[in-house]
Image (spheres, helix red, strand yellow):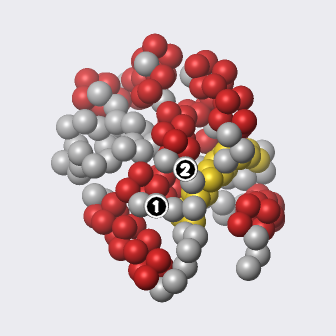
Amino acid sequence: SPRWIDDTAEVVTEFKDEGFTRVVLVGLCSGAYTALEGAFHNEVAGVIAINPILSSAEMNKASPTRDARRRAFRPLPVPLARLAAPHGRTAWSIWTAYQQIRPRAAPMAVIADVLKRGPQVMLVLAEVDRPPFDVVWYWRLRARYLDKTGRFTRKHFLDLDHPALVAAGRIRLMQELTQYVALTWGTH
């Protein structure tokens, strides 16, 4: 929803008005997208994005929910969005090839742009959610630089499913997040 941008700003402002000095946005799937989007529009200490979805055929450049303020979403061009309905695999293959020649259209560009704004970023991916973040060669090579910033952590778990419903993956995710938060921002 386009309202999420405003809602996130209200939440961040509310926490800061209450005296919290470090706000960390955490989300799963569309919530992870919202957390990344929120980092573009608010001063936050960090983002923990779990299995973010940053492209979809439904939300494309001609979508009625398109909002010029969106910076974290990588919309499919309209012809590819139209092609996706009858020929999804073909459309996504073309989109992946396009990202090879235009790496700024790839999801990892969002992570790099958020890091430029200053917050810590943890990207957590289930095995099924890895491909959009791994297919572009430019970002595979650039990942070493992102790691060297000291503000980027990337984890992927074989036992984690997309919605984190499988107990083993969810427990491991909670352990990793607890450790990450404690090491990054302290426990106080």
For label 2, the SS is: loop
Mark 1 is surrounded, within 10 Å at the Cα level, by few (under 14), some (14 to 19) or many (20 or more) other residues, namely some
- The image position of residue 66, as x and y in percent, is 24, 46
Q: Specify the quadrant of the image occupied by residue 144.
A: top right
- The image position of residue 58, as x and y in percent, is 32, 42
Q: Specify the quadrant of the image occupied by residue 8.
A: bottom left
- The image position of residue 141, as x and y in percent, is 66, 21
Q: Amino acid at mark 1?
A: Glu
Task: From the viewer's side, name the closer residue of 35 and 157.
Answer: 35
Quadrant including the C terminus: bottom right
- The image position of residue 49, as x and y in percent, is 58, 54
Q: Which residue is rendered at x = 55% and y = 69% of the image?
A: 23
Q: Which residue is rendered at x = 57% and y = 54% of the image?
A: 119
How many badges with numbers are in the image? 2
Q: Is residue 184 left or right of residue 137?
A: right
Does 180 appear above or below 86?
below
Task: From the viewer's side, name the closer residue of 38 and 118.
Answer: 118
Q: Amino acid at mark 2?
A: Gly
Can residue 80 be seen here?
A: yes
Kindly give the residue lying farthest to the bottom in the view shown. 18
Mark 1 touching mark 2, by CB under 8 A? yes
Q: Is residue 29 left or right of residue 10?
A: right
Name the disc covering residue 102, or none.
none
Can residue 93 be seen here?
A: no
Q: Which residue is mark 2?
A: 118
Name the disc covering residue 43, or none.
1
